[in-house]
Image (cartoon, grey):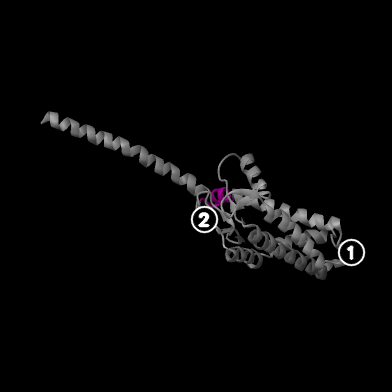
Amino acid sequence: MLATDAPTGTMDSSSSNQSAPAQQTSTSAAPAEEQIRQTKRILGIIPNFRAVSTSQVLPPQSPKEKFITATEDSFDYSAVLLPAVLAGYSQATNATPEFHQGAAGYGRYLWHSYVDQAVENYAVEFVVPVITHQDNRYYTLGKGGFFKRTGYALSRVVITRADNGTETFNTSEVIGAGAAAGISNLYYPSGERTFGNTGEKWGLNVGVDAATFVFKEFWPDINNAIFHTKD
């Protein structure tokens, strides 16, 4: 009986030891995955529909989905926030003297900034991605140090994913932002339709998107630090 009982105890011990690492692995892996999860909105207000968590594997976007994304970014109730800030800055620096000052002048700056944003959204997120078969979503890196993740986020303005999952030059961002800057000449005063102004708007479009990518990259970390939530 003693000889029979000994192997039984050994088997129970080894079985317990084998299951322990598996349990430790699953519990230690879960927080790492949760920390990089994106939310649909930032601070419950700003759209974050294009940000994809590192752990997510998504199918290619259809043209309809790309159109819907551009429309959500352009006509969401919060879509006026960035144009409002840019309009205030432009008026303060007298960027377009033809608009003048005061409330009426701010109104002109505001609707021009809003249309600029909408045109750029449709060019970068819908028209060019459909033509070039590129994915307009931002895929979070979610790991590594601050400089590594920041560099990765900034690089996404020139590197993106094709619909087949391979990395490619971000034609959608570079060409789309430039096309939007060119189209803006149709509704700005004739005195502002210069090559220099168009190039400046092109750079602004790309710069705003680059800053947005950096913010999206670190938003899950900020969200967890402020609200203590990993989802």
Q: Residue at x 78, y 69 (%)?
A: 107
Query: Which quadrant would the N terminus be assigned to in this image?
Result: top left
Tag 2: amino acid: Leu
Residues 98 and 181: in front is 181
Determine if residue 143 is in view.
Answer: yes
Image quarter of residue 94: bottom right
Please state the total of marks drawn on the protein image.
2
The answer to whether 3 appears left or right of 169 in the picture is left
In this view, the mark in front (2 or 1) = 2
Disc number placed over residue 191 in the picture, else none: 1
> Which secondary structure dominates the residues rendered in magenta?
helix
Mark found first going from the N terminus, 2 or 1: 2
Q: Is residue 103 above or below residue 48?
A: below
Residues 118 and 176: in front is 176
Disc number placed over residue 58 in the picture, else none: 2
Tag 1: amino acid: Gly
Q: Residue at x 81, y 67 (%)?
A: 186
SS for tag 1?
helix
Task: Please identify the residue farthest to the left as the structure is shown.
Answer: 1
SS for tag 2?
loop
Residue 61, horizontal then vertical, whole percent: 56, 60
Task: Please identify the residue farthest to the top as the structure is shown.
Answer: 3
Residue range in magenta is 219-228
Residues 162 and 54: in front is 162
Residue 138, horizontal then vertical, whole percent: 60, 53
